[in-house]
Amino acid sequence: MKKVSTLTILSLCATLPLVAQGINFLDQPEWKEVLTVAAKQNKLIFMDCYTTWCGPCKQLAEKVFPLPEVGNYFNDNFINVKYDMEKGEGKELNQHYKPYIIGYPTMLLIDKDGKVVQQIAGYKEPDALIAAITAGVEGKGFYVLKAKYEAGERDVDFLIDYIAALNAAFLKKEIEAVVIDYMESIPLDSLLTPKNWGIVYEQIKDPYSPQFEHLLRNMSRHVYKPYVNAYQLERQLSRAFDRAIDEITDLQKDRQENILPLKNDPDKIARLRTLIGITDIRRAEAQRAALKLHELKVEGKWSEVLDCMDYYLPIGVLSTSSTNKTIQYLAAKATDEATLRRCLAIMEPIQLAAEQQRGLLNYHNTLAALYRALGDKANAEKSQAIYDEHIERERERFRAFIQE
């Protein structure tokens, strides 16, 4: 039987009526013939770049591409092709378009000369996918806008389109760089105008920046405006404080897993404490407690650390994670028996509650460290064995998950 060429199939697709049943893809067609038909029909090419192991690729294929409204748009306007990037001609196209494929799935809009005019990455809902492709058709594709940005274009309406294109391409770091550059170029008072706010608010997350402080000091004037999501904003600011505090207070270990002395950065601590005091944001008391405990640990005031914990734990200010981190540090650095036994009295009930409520065994390594420091070899070995067994089970679960 004579083989029907890709060119013939594409020509037939252009003349036959299509039933609304999702995107009609050609699977692994000969690329040269696709370009030939694109030139003949004066159409752009929509290319789905996928792999068989990619979960989001499968979601697109099962949930988005088969939708009638998606099919109507793509079948009417484009030549639709898909390639497994690890098979046949897909391997060659993967190398050719490598600068445009940052991961899978990637979807490219390509002209008749093989030039990419739009790049989209990651799973996209139907409306978002159509909007991103439409932007490419209308001359607002990523590469057109990137060229304008590099030429110095900074108009706010342009930036809105450019950030949308970056977001569609899943270029998160580039979005952050663009927004920070813009924020630093405009007066602080203009940050909270509606258009600017739509661009910058997600990137106001550095507590040491003037933009962050300006926002805190002016929240009461803007938090009730219709374009400001007060809950989302408070959560964003609170998380920014959490990240900054974690950077200062997190435990550091050497290559032998020995816990190192804590960072001592009084200027940053003073800055964070001042900012937290400007407005009563979510988790403010917990953040103040974390800073206070850190300062006491740096100074080696073990008794005062434990006194603070005795005060904060009953009122629910300290999380079990932060408590565990503090006790781990004391287990490594404190030497007197009274301190270590007070630590044990805190951690044993936390571990018991974790097992009773959720079956978690996360804190047995901390208990093992305390038992060792107290010279209780039997309980230290028992707790360490429970912890190691739990970690190995989690590793097995992860290995099984990625092999599915």
Image (cartoon, rainbow, N blue to C red):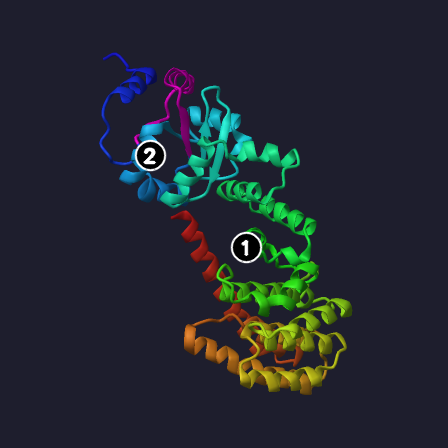
User: Which mark lies nearer to you, 1 or 2?
Assistant: 1
Residue 341 in the image: state x and y as whole percent: 63, 85
The mark nearer the N terminus, 1 or 2, is 2
**Residue 22 x %, y %:** 28, 36
Left of 299 or right of it: where is 241? left
- Residue that label 2 marks: 73
Q: Position of residue 298 (x, y in %)?
A: 74, 74
Instruction: Establish if 339 lies above or below 243.
Output: below
Residue ID at (50%, 34%): 141
Residue type of the residue flagged with mark 1? Pro
Q: Please state which amino acid type lies under the numbered disc 2.
A: Tyr
Tell me how far mark 1 sits from mark 2, CA to CA. Answer: 33 Å
Say which quarter of the image contains residue 263: bottom right
Identify whether 153 is placed above or below 115: below
**50 on left or right of 65:** right
Whether label 1 touches label 2, CB < 8 Å: no
**Magenta residue span:** 24-49
10 Å neighbourhood of mark 2: few (<14), some, or many (≥20)? some
Does the stretch in magenta take in 29?
Answer: yes
Say which element carries label 2. Answer: helix
Q: Nearer the viewer, residue 1 or 366?
A: 1
Going 65% across and 84% down the picture, which residue do you hit? 308
- In the picture of the structure, the residue carrying the numbered disc 1 is 194
Q: Is residue 372 visible?
A: no
